[in-house]
Amino acid sequence: MEVVEKKTKKVVALRKIHETAVIHPGAEIGKDVVIGPYAIIGEHVELGDGCVVGPHVVIDGWTRIGCNNKFYHGASIGCDPQDLKFKGEKTFLVIGDNNIFREHVTISRGTGEGGGETRIGNDNFFMAYSHVAHDCRVGNHVILTNAASLGGHVIIEDRVNIGGLSGVHQFTKVGKMSMIGGCTKVIRDVPPFVIVDGVPARVAGINVVGLRRNEIPPEIRDEIKKAYRILYRSNLTIAQAIEQMEQQLQGYPEIDHFIRFLRNVERGICR
């Protein structure tokens, strides 16, 4: 659909929707949206300005999507959760801005027993065949490499990189700026700023490259290294490590976040 401004005679494209796309009349579609062949947009979908929906993409359920997101061929967004307890109740998927969903990515809505909502932030990159299950929370600037999968209720903090074919167990938390190697099985919480790898996942060191790329100053990187040594090299319990960190380390926001993450661990941490 196009409109023509009367004064300038300039053609302004509001939407470009392929004739084979199926869009429910109840869906809310923003401006400058592109919807490709055979895409399906459900009744309760809100699609923000500037989004691009590729061919054969399905966006359904109570799904609210921000601006400038791009969905590639065959993605399934807002589908029913893969949970036997789900009985068709009204649940939600909320997606922020500037995310990329490559071919055949699947993102499930929440469940009634899990808070009713799956939430994804901004500027994330979901590579082909990756999966986000029901009731997950994904932050900002996260990368899920090809075929990486998140189980239900997983929390992924900002700027996490998850390698291809990796699986993150349900109810697990992954701390910010951490990195999960390819083909890794994550069954315990991953503290911020570390690298884990293997089956099951084991800590392999600090994500030094990630810290530098995110412009963490050298003095804070040094404090993170000290926190790492206290947690992993001192044979202390988590509670003992927290106490020692509070006594010995500078009160940088990153250190405060590291300690706060450890206080909220419920499944144990990768060692």
Image (cartoon, rainbow, N blue to C red):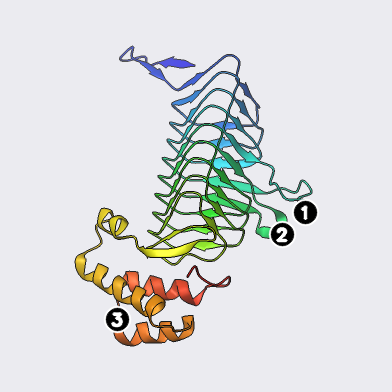
Packing grade of label 2 (10 A; few <14, some 14-19, many >=20) is: few
Q: Residues within 10 Å of mark 3 (few under 14, many from 20)?
A: some
Instruction: Name the image quarter holding residue 116.
Output: bottom right
Q: Which residue occupies the foreground of this view, 175 or 197?
A: 197
**Can you tell which quarter of the image residue 135 is in?**
bottom right
- Is residue 106 or residue 59 the one in the foreground? 106
Q: CA distance from mark 3 to mark 2?
A: 40 Å
Q: Are marks 2 and 1 in contact (CB under 8 Å)?
A: yes
Q: Is residue 59 visible?
A: yes
Q: Which residue is mark 2?
A: 113
Q: Residue furthest left?
A: 218
Q: Is residue 95 above or below residue 220?
A: above
Q: Earlier in the sequence, mark 2 or mark 1?
A: 1
Q: Which mark is residue 85?
A: 1
89 up-or-down from 57: above or below: below
Residue assigned mark 3: 249
> Label 3 near label 1: C-beta < 8 Å?
no
